[in-house]
Image (cartoon, rainbow, N blue to C red):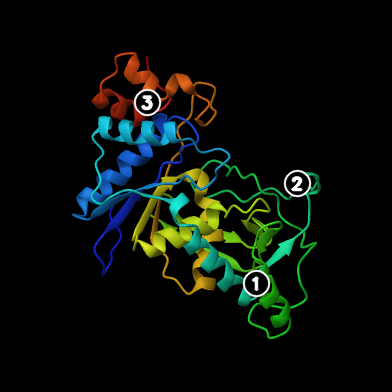
Amino acid sequence: MALPPSSHPYRGRLAPSPTGLLHLGHARTFAVAHQRARAAGGTLLLRIDDLDPHRSRAAFAEAAVEDLRWLGLDWDEAPCRQSERRAYYRGAWERLVLGGWVYPCQCSRRELQQLASAPHETARGASPLPDDEPVYPGTCRPRWQPGENQGAAERQAWCAAGPSGRNWRFRVPDARAIEFADGSFGPQKFIAGEAFGDFAIWRRDDVPSYQLAVVVDDAATGITEVVRGADLLLSTARQLLLYRALGLSAPGWFHCPLMLDRQGERLAKRNDALSIRALREQGYSARRVLEEAGSAPLAR
């Protein structure tokens, strides 16, 4: 649990997504993020990751803030919302387009679901990594490589037209090893093109992807360490490629073990019985919820 060495003051963040009620797994992760920021004498931010307008709900955002406060997990600066930062994501998208890093993809969701993707690598010390994006076969990849002048005029035209109406993918460097040290699970290594392929950074319904938004936001707010669940270890490899393509400095990483229910399944927001709100209504104290969040499954 040692903190990473850094020449910069520690800056961490709590980043709930308001697509459902927070559960015990969130309590565990956010408590660790809070503990690490306070132990370092650093700053902790609150960001509401309400990027997806189709799934985010204001009521869930309000519940998340209330639950965090009830748990005693405070923060230091005024909260920000991803829904208010679209211009920054659009600017990053344009930089990636002009650099030849991303391209439009016409493949339908059905076509992608039919792909026979290879099994993902497993993070050392973690459970097999869940992932909802199959390894893309490169169907719509352009001829040019990132950084080449070939295709410059077409990329300029894409920027002028904007991202709406097409999916956009980041071109990964095939067979390149993406390595990083995780504060919880230790050294990690994923092979681009095998563990993951060209990944989405903007959807055809004009919504930026999680991968792009968190990179832009964490860099803009000077986050020095990202604390989150182990299900996002594979996303870290993707995001490191975005940091490099955008010329940004990446933070350190600390991924918390996933919390499982009695059936051995990881907790999800559909587990209403294990939501912080439900436990609170059943008479659990904040201290007990945090204690229970430190072990799984929940002992009644």
The local secondary structure at tag 2 comes to helix
Q: In this view, does 123 lie to the left or right of 103?
A: left
How packed mark 2 is, by other alpha carbons closer than 10 Å (few <14, some 14-19, many 20 or more), is few
Q: Does 80 sit above or below residue 277?
A: below
Q: Could you tell me residue 118's position as x and y percent?
A: 73, 50
Q: Is residue 154 left or right of residue 22?
A: right
Question: Label 2 belongs to which residue?
Answer: 109
Give the CA distance from mark 3 to mark 1: 46 Å
Type of amino acid under label 2:
Arg
Image quarter where the C terminus lies is top left
Mark 1 vs mark 2: give the one in front. Answer: 1
Q: Residue drawn 64% across and 44% down?
A: 132
Question: Label 3 belongs to which residue?
Answer: 276
The local secondary structure at tag 3 comes to helix
Q: Residue drawn 35% across and 57% down?
A: 225
Q: Does 214 sit above or below residue 109?
A: below
Q: Is residue 100 left or right of residue 223?
A: right
Q: Could you tell me residue 176's position as x and y percent?
A: 62, 69
The local secondary structure at tag 1 comes to helix
Which of the pair 196/242 is nearer the observer? Answer: 242
Question: Label 1 belongs to which residue?
Answer: 160
